[in-house]
Amino acid sequence: MRLYFSRNYNPRLAVAVARHLRAPVEYEFAEPFKPDQEARFLALNPNRSIPILVEDDGSTMWEADAIACRLSQLAGSDFWRQGAAQPDMIRWLSWGYWNIVRACDAVHFERVTKQRYGHGPIDAAKVAEGLAEFASSAALLQGQLAARDWVLADGLSYADFRLACVLPYADVAGLPLADFPAVQAWHDRLMALPAWADPFDGLHAPALPPIL
Ligand SMILES: N[C@@H](CCC(=O)N[C@@H](CS)C(=O)NCC(=O)O)C(=O)O
């Protein structure tokens, strides 16, 4: 199996899952949006984005969540919950993607992605909107994490990884994590996991372009 990745946050999430689960995948750094890579990556994913998991039979899986589900299945792990805990995990995945991840992404896109790739000036109104959404989402998450270490009652799961997937970029994006101490503490607990702290350790993974 081969996992195509970059240092951006969705591919980072998939690599972290694979390394956390010690999945037997080969990792290949990819740049699907380079013009000369278009045909190659469109053949693997009609969105042309990464992560992409190519299985030994040549079939492909894209979307970080689906890849996490597949890798957890192959590892026989409960990281992607089965049984009674599954609806709760899906609840947090769904809420997380549409709330905290989207809010973080809005701010990160303006302050980081656009500045890395020369896609125009920071739109202050979009940053303000993203920060407001971040504050309301982080407040809700803060309540959930007040009396527990991980989002689900029975321990670490993929929901924690998905919800936190932009937070390793919080410093560079200027996301005010410290305003939410329980969220900051949860982020710190995640950062104590080697697979989350540095999923690219030992891989060929060139640094992202500098922020201009
Ligand atoms: N919904 C997709 C989003 C995938 C996506 O947007 N990938 C971006 C990075 S976050 C990408 O392919 N960027 C090109 C690159 O990293 O080179 C997922 O969850 O996997």
Image (spheres, helix red, strand yellow):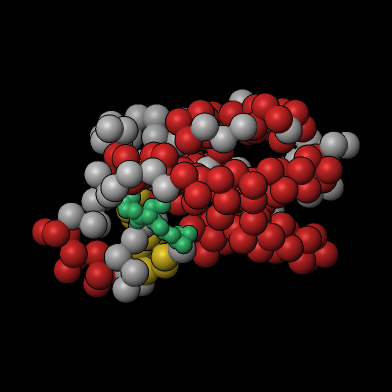
Residue placed farthest to the left in the image?
36
Q: Relative to residue 155, is residue 162 drawn left or right?
A: left
When asked about the image quadrant of residue 131, the answer is: top right
Name the residue at 45% across, 31% down.
172
Give residue 29's position: percent from left, percent from top: 28, 45
- Residue 68 visible: yes
Q: Is residue 36 above or below residue 14?
A: below
Q: Quick check: which quadrant has ligand 1?
A: bottom left
Give residue 10's position: percent from left, percent from top: 45, 51
Name the residue at 35% across, 30% down.
202
Give residue 67's position: percent from left, percent from top: 49, 60
Name the residue at 85% across, 37% down.
146
Front-most of 16 and 98? Answer: 98
- Residue 14 visible: no
Q: Quadrant of the N terminus?
A: bottom left
Name the residue at 71% across, 30% down.
179
Q: Is residue 187 above or below residue 7?
A: above
Give residue 106's position: percent from left, percent from top: 50, 51
Q: Relative to residue 90, is residue 103 drawn left or right?
A: left
Counting every numbered tag in the picture gives 0
When asked about the image quadrant of residue 211, the answer is: top left
Front-most of 119 and 10? Answer: 119
Q: Relative to residue 153, is residue 60 drawn left or right?
A: left
